[in-house]
Image (cartoon, rainbow, N blue to C red):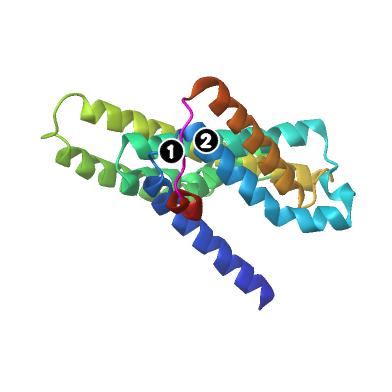
Amino acid sequence: MRANLFALAAIGLWASLAALGVALRHVPPFLLTGIALALGSVLAWPAVLRDQRQWRVAPRTLGLGVFTLFGYHFLLFIGFRLAPAVEVNLINYLWPLLIVVLAPMYLPGLKLRGIHIGAAVMGFTGAALAIWGAGADTKTLPGNASSVSGLGYLLALGSAFIWANYSLQTKRLELSGKGFPTAAIGLFGLLSGLLSLACHWLLEAPVSLSAHDWLLL
């Protein structure tokens, strides 16, 4: 039962990401990414306070985790700014399909069967049809709105590839006996959050966040 509750909570977090990202689109992307990831890392702190070894991971693994959390969320939040949120989120959620399609490249002994290929084609086709339909609605918009939306879709696809790569790389580490504690994800989030905040300080104009913004964060 406890595992099921954790799984349901994870689904709730994933489901709320798009809505919260759109509601906070006025927040500079590096700042939004940095605060969200730093706050998210707090969940791992109790485990680390009990056992500091939870954050002892190999440098390569640390780089994978930081790059993934930083790159995935940054690309996705930019995508939400440039294109309709529903379509962006749909493209982002191609990552489970990408895991299936790319798995043979990462995990030895795995081969794609016809049912895998058929399911992947159906998924990609469905996403393409949804985006094509949304593109028809933007033809009446002024200027280069359609090209901007296209960039947003491309960034969302990039975020999907980043997350699929992370999932497969961590599985490969686990199979090779080089896995890492779950609490180490808190370290990934903290460091990638600090990296994002440093980018905000260097590249973005300072802003003031309202109490409502902090509540959403």
Quarter containing the N terminus: bottom right
Query: What segment is highlighted magenta in the picture?
Result: 205-210
- Residue 172, how many percent across, how many down? 73, 42
Are the residues at dot 2 and dot 1 in contact (C-beta closer than 8 Å)? Answer: yes
Tag shown at residue 27: 1
- Residue 189, how many percent across, how many down? 66, 43
Q: Is residue 59 left or right of residue 209?
A: right
Query: Can residue 40 be seen in this snapshot?
Result: yes
Tag shown at residue 61: none
Q: Which residue is mark 2?
A: 31
Residue 140 position (above or below residue 147): below
Q: Quadrant of residue 198?
A: top right
Secondary structure of residue under mark 2: helix
Tag 1: Cα neighbours inside 10 Å, few (<14), some, or many (≥20)?
Answer: some
Residue 95 position (above or below residue 43): above
Q: Amino acid at mark 2?
A: Leu
Query: Can residue 107 be seen in this snapshot?
Result: no
Q: Is residue 107 left or right of residue 197?
A: right
- Residue 165, how many percent across, how many down? 60, 38
Q: Quadrant of residue 99?
A: top right
- Rounded to the nearest angstrom, the CA distance separating label 2 from label 1 is 7 Å
Tag 2: Cα neighbours inside 10 Å, few (<14), some, or many (≥20)?
Answer: many
Residue 4 is covered by the magenta coloring: no
- Nearest to the observer: residue 99 or residue 69: 69
Residue placed furthest toward the left: 140
- Nearest to the observer: residue 87 or residue 202: 202
Secondary structure of residue under mark 1: loop
Q: Quadrant of residue 34?
A: top right
Residue 8 position (above or below residue 21): below
Q: Is residue 106 left or right of residue 132?
A: right
